[in-house]
Amino acid sequence: MRLENKPLGFVINFLLGVSWAVMFLGALTSFLSLYHDSFLLAVVSAFIGAIPGLVAVLLLEHIITNKEKLAELKKQTALLEEIKRGLSTKD
């Protein structure tokens, strides 16, 4: 779990797992429904069936990355303010 907020991290990771399952099931069902007609059509259909799940995975990964970036920026801001206070007391 990469997020510091435990409940939010649990929900996002759960939704990430659901998104991977949707991607896999979408690709599998699309492929299996059309493989008897044409293999090429089945592969293209599997890719199209996987797109909604992949979009959800990308969206959730983007959310996780932005939350991590925000947490890191807060840490950096706190350190910079501490350095600033340390320099101003020496003057």
Image (spheres, rainbow, N blue to C red):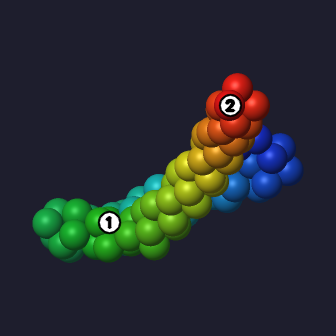
Please rate how many residues cluster around mark 2, counting C-alpha atoms within 10 Å: few if below 14, some from 14 to 19, many from 20: few
Foreground residue among 74 and 61 = 74
Res 86 quadrant in image: top right
Residue kind at label 2, given as amino acid type: Asp
Task: For residue 71, say whether it is visible.
Answer: no
The image shows residue 38 at horizontal and vertical percentages of 16, 70
Q: Secondary structure at mark 2?
A: loop
Which mark identifies residue 91? 2
Quarter the C terminus occupies: top right
Which residue in the rendered view is the most extreme toward the top? 90
Observer-nearest of 51 and 40: 51
* Up/down of 10 relative to 75, above or below: below
Relative height, residue 53 to residue 1 (above, below): below
The residue lying at 69 percent from left, 55 percent from top is 12
On residue 46, the disc is 1
Residue at figure coordinates x 29%, y 66% from the top left: 47
Q: Secondary structure at mark 1?
A: helix
- As drawn, the residue found furthest toward the right would be 7
For image coordinates 46% across by 61% down, the residue present is: 58
Count up the numbered dots: 2
Tell me residue 24's x, y (percent). Answer: 47, 56
Relative side of 44 to 33, left or right? left
Quarter of the image with the N terminus in it: top right
Nearer-the-camera pick, 14 or 59: 59
Q: CA distance from mark 1 to mark 2?
A: 67 Å
